[in-house]
Image (cartoon, grey):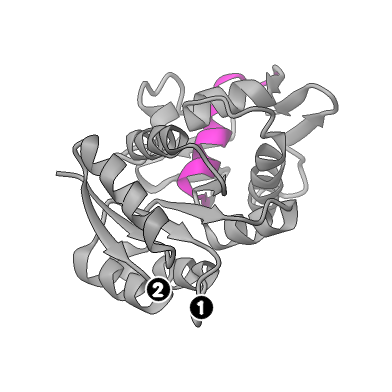
């Protein structure tokens, strides 16, 4: 059974999430503050963590950072819950390695959908690379088992979402991919106009690709349209 850790100091919200995820057949473990949540993550090794940001003493960003630095659970998918909707707060979570973001108040069906989509994508192999249409083109090679890309002889590890974005662009190299298509193909759903999320991920992805690109700019922004991978 898939095990999900829910960490939120608001007991009513925590219980609501627990009940609805259990109705979907998931096993749910509850933590009610950051310290307890991180301890449970290490002890229970969950398949996914739903993590609130604003908690006393140890906040959600700190817990997420500790998870990402903790060997056995470092790659655990994380959905962040927050009452803060500003882009810079989203960027902070994505900087740490948070996989998805949901702003309070939210519809519980939306959370369940995102949990399902994230578990599908991170179930052993990146979602968009499952078909493996194309793994190598010219100097670029995809390494899906390690969520990495190789350009010439240099390898760069990506987060699962970054890998799926790059793979979607890679499979359509030379052609523009719209932000809405990226949301649909990578996240598995189409949140209303959540284009800022794409922009943040593209910025982080571009910085990682540039590290091994030897000066070549692979990811092009088509303003008002989307993104294109030039190889």
In-image side of 173 versus 7 (left or right): right
Q: Is residue 223 within the magenta segment?
A: no
**Residue that appears at 51% across and 30% down:** 186
Point out the stretch of residues depicted in magenta: 156-174
In the rendered structure, are the residues bearing label 1 and label 2 in contact, judged by CB atoms less than 8 Å apart? yes
13 vs 85, nearest the viewer: 13
Q: Is residue 159 within the magenta segment?
A: yes
120 vs 38, nearest the viewer: 38
Q: Horizontal and vertical percent for residue 29?
A: 24, 59
Q: Horizontal and vertical percent for residue 125?
A: 33, 37
Give the Cα separation between the discs numbered 1 and 2.
7 Å
In-image side of 145 versus 142 (left or right): left
Q: Which mark is residue 56?
A: 1
For label 2, the crowd category at 10 Å Cα-Cα, with few meaning under 14, some 14 to 19 and many 20 or more, is many
Mark 2 sits on what residue?
A: 33
The correct choice, above or below, for 111 with respect to 70 in the image is above
* Image quadrant occupied by the N terminus: top left
Q: Which mark is residue 202?
A: none
**Residue that appears at 64% across and 61% down:** 92
């Amino acid at each position: 059974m898939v095990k999900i850790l829910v960490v939120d100091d608001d007991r009513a919200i925590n219980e609501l999430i627990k009940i609805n995820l259990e109705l979907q057949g998931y096993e749910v473990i509850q933590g009610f503050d950051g310290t307890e949540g991180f301890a449970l993550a290490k002890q229970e090794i969950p398949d996914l963590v739903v993590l609130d940001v604003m908690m006393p003493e140890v906040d959600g960003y700190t817990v997420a950072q500790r998870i990402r630095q903790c060997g056995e659970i470092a790659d655990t998918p994380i959905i962040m819950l927050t009452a803060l909707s500003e882009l810079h707060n989203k960027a902070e979570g994505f900087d740490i390695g948070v996989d998805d973001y949901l702003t309070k108040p939210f519809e519980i069906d939306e959370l369940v959908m995102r949990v399902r989509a994230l578990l599908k994508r991170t179930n052993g192999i990146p979602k968009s690379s499952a078909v493996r249409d194309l793994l190598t083109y010219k100097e670029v090679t995809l390494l899906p088992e390690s969520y990495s890309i190789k350009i010439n002889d240099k390898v760069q590890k990506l987060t699962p979402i970054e890998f799926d974005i790059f793979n979607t662009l890679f499979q359509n190299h030379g052609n523009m991919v719209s932000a809405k298509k990226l949301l649909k193909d990578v996240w598995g759903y189409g949140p209303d106009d959540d284009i800022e999320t794409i922009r943040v991920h593209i910025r982080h992805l571009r910085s990682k690709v540039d590290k091994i690109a030897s000066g070549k700019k692979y990811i092009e922004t088509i303003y008002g349209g989307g993104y294109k991978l030039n190889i």
